Image: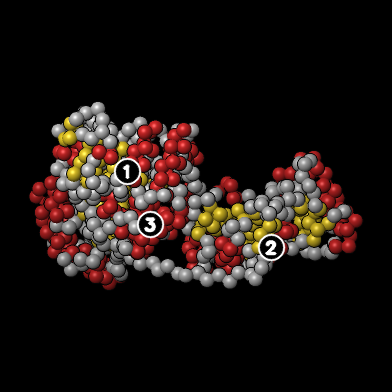
Amino acid sequence: MTTLNQITNPKSIAIVGASDDKNRIGGRPLSHMIEQNFEGTVYPVNPNREMVQGLKSYSNLQDIPGDLDFVLIAVPAKFVVNVIQDAVKKNARTALIFSSGFSEIGGEGELYQQKIRKICHQSNLRVIGPNCLGLFNSQSRFYPTFTSTIDRATPIPGDISIASQSGAYGSHIYMVSHQRGLGIRYWITTGNEVDLSVGEAIQLLAEDDNVHTIMAYVESVKNGVQFVNALETARQKKKPVILMKVGRSDVGAAAANSHTASLAGEDAIYEEVIRAHGAYRVRSTEEMLDVAYATKPKIYPIGKNLGIVTISGGGGVLMADAASDVGLKVGAMPKGAQKELKEIVPFASPMNPVDVTAQFFNDLSIVPKFIDLMLSQGGYDGIIGFWTSVAGSPKMSQPLLDALKQVMTNYSEKIFINSMVASNDIVKHYEKEGFLSIEDPTRAVVSMAALMFFGEKFNEKNEKIEIQPPSKINIPRRKLNEIECAEILEKFGINLNKGKLINNVKEIKNLYKDIEDGYVMKVVSKDIQHKTEVGGIAINIKSLIEAETKYDEIIKNVKSKSPKALIEGVMISPMIKGGVETILGAKVDPVFGPVVMFGLGGIYTEVLKDISFAEAPLNKKIAIKMISRLKSAKMFEGSRGLKLNLDHLLDNIVKLSEFIYICKDIVKEVEMNPLVIREDMVIGLDALIIPNEEGEKNA
C-alpha cells in the first residue's frame, strides 16, 4: 500500500539529468536540497560530468551503489522509458518525471506514456507525472521540483497541504499561500497522471496525520470512484478539502481537456459530487486562501445561524445580504435579549446585525457584553465582528483584543471572525491570540459559510440504500420507441401516460371516445427523439374528425421533415392538463457513473436550466435535498397555494435512480420530459431510453 511517507520522505534520491547550472530544470531540485540541507542522500546522474554542484556524478542509475527510494527524471521524453526500467531494477519506490512530450502532444508521446503505464502495472514502482512540476515536503526539506517559488519563498512547515494537476497554477497557489502566512507541509503536482492521480494525492494527504486542511486544483478526473473515495476519506477524518475545479464554461472545459489530455466531465455533475462528498468548491484563489485560513482554529459549526456584531449599520446590511447569498440565516435576537441590549446602549440596533454604534469608542466594555448576550441567548453558530479600520488604531487595537478575549474565553467551541483593516503586525498579534482576521466583510461571510458547510458535512452519516429490483427486465440494445420505453419504466413503478398505437387512420374510430380534456397524438419512431421538431405531435384533439385529420398531418410532416425515419405508427393518449412540467432523467456519467437529474421541464428546460443532480441510487431524503437546491424549490413546497403531489414525485425520483443504477451496464440515458406534477398525480408524458446498442442483455 502506497503511503504519503513513501512518496515525500525518501532516504535516497537520484536525479537523472542533473545539471551543474542551478537555474536549469535539472539543476534546480539539486540546488534546493543542497541549500535546504535535505537529510537524505542525493545522487546526481549525468554521464557528461564527474561532479555536479559539488556532488559526485554517476553515468546511469545502475552505477549507483545499493537500492534507491526515489528517482527524479529530467531528460528528453525519448529516454524516459529506459530510465523507468532502470528505476525498477534499482527497487525504487517512486519515480517523478519532469519531462514533457507525452500524451499532451499525442502521437509518439502517447506511446511513451502507455509504455510507462504498463511498467507501473507490472511493478511496485509509483510514477508521478510526466509533464510534472514536482512536489515538496517542507518538514523533511525534500524538494524534487523546479518551481522558482522555492527560491523566493522557502516553505514554512504547517498542517495545510496542496494537490494540483497543474504545476504552474499549483506554484501560484503555494506562493500566495506563503504570502498569506499559511504553512504548507506537502505540495504535490500530478501532471499527466500516468499513475498517481490528483484524487489519489488527496487520498494520501487525507490519510496523513500531519495534514489538517487540503487545497486542491482539479482540471479533470479519470477515476471517479477513486476521487470520491478520497473526498470521503477526508470527510470522515474531518479534514477540509477546499477544491478548485476548473472547466465550468464550455471554453474552460475544452481548455482543460486539451491541457491534461483527458476527459472533462459535465460540470453540474462535478458540482454535485464535490458537494455531496464534503469538499467545498471555490471559484477563486482568494476564496481558497480565505477558507484555508479560516480552518486554522479547527472549529466547524454544525448550524448555519450567523450572528453579526458591527460598529457600522451599513456594514451590517452588507454582511446580511452576503449571508443570504451563501445560504446562511441571520436570525433575530430573542425579544428578551434585545431588551437587555437596549438597556446597555439605548440607541443600539439589537436585532441582528447588532450595531453597537459609535458608543464603541466611549466604552469598549459593551463589546463583550453584546457578544456574550449574542452567544448565550441568540443561538448563533458563529459570530463575525466588523470593526472597519478602528481595530487598526494603536490606541484601540489592544483594548478591543482584550475585550474579545474576555468574552470568548467562555465560548471556546464557537468560531469568531474579525473583519478589520489593520497592519500586518496587529493582524498577526490577533492571530497569535486565536482570533482570525479577514479584511473584507463579504469574504469573511463566505469563509464562515464554508466552515458551516464543513460542520454539516463532517456530521453527516452515510445511509445504506437498499434496492429491490424487479425479478427480470429485458432491455434490447437498440433504438427504442416511446411505447417500449414506457413499458420498461412502468415495470419499475414509474407512472406514464398510457396510449394506443394506431397504424392507419381507420383504427381511430374504434379507439376514440369523447373525454373532457381531449387527446394528444404523437408519432412513434425509434429514429425520432424530439417529435415537436418534425411536426410529430398534435394536442387538444376534441373530436373524431380532428383526430383523423391530425393523424394524416403527423404522417405527412414526418415524412417531409425526416424522410429516413422509420414510422411505426401514431400513439393516441388522453390529454393531461394543468400541473407543473418538470424533467426527470438519468444518465451514466463516464467519470462518476449513474446520476439522476431533476428540474423544471418542458419549454423551460433549455431556457432556465434550473436542474440539480444526485448520484444514484438515492432515497427520499436525498431527493428532497436535490429539489431544495433548485431555484424553483419553493414551487414544490406549495408556494402561492400551488398544490403538488410531492410524495409521489419523490417516489418517482427514487425509482428512476434505482432503474439507472440497476441498468447502468445496459442503459446510457433515460428521460421523461415533461413529467407533470399535479395534486392528484405525477405522470410522465414522454419517455426516452437510450440503451448501449450491442446485443441484448437482461438486468
Q: Residue 90: x percent and y percent? A: 29, 45
Is residue 319 visible to us here? no
> Residue 230: which disc?
3
**SS at circle 3:** helix
> Furthest residue to the left?
395
Q: Amino acid at mark 1?
A: Ala
> Residue 474: which disc?
2
Q: CA distance from mark 3 to mark 1?
A: 28 Å
Q: Residues within 10 Å of mark 1 (few under 14, many from 20)?
A: many
Which residue carries the number 1 mark? 87
Q: CA distance from mark 2 to mark 1?
A: 52 Å
Given residues 13 and 135, the one toward you in this image is 13
Name the residue located 44 percent from the left edge and 34 percent from the top edge: 109
Name the residue located 25 percent from the left edge and 38 percent from the top edge: 63
Q: Amino acid at mark 2?
A: Asn
Given residues 695 and 234, the one toward you in this image is 695
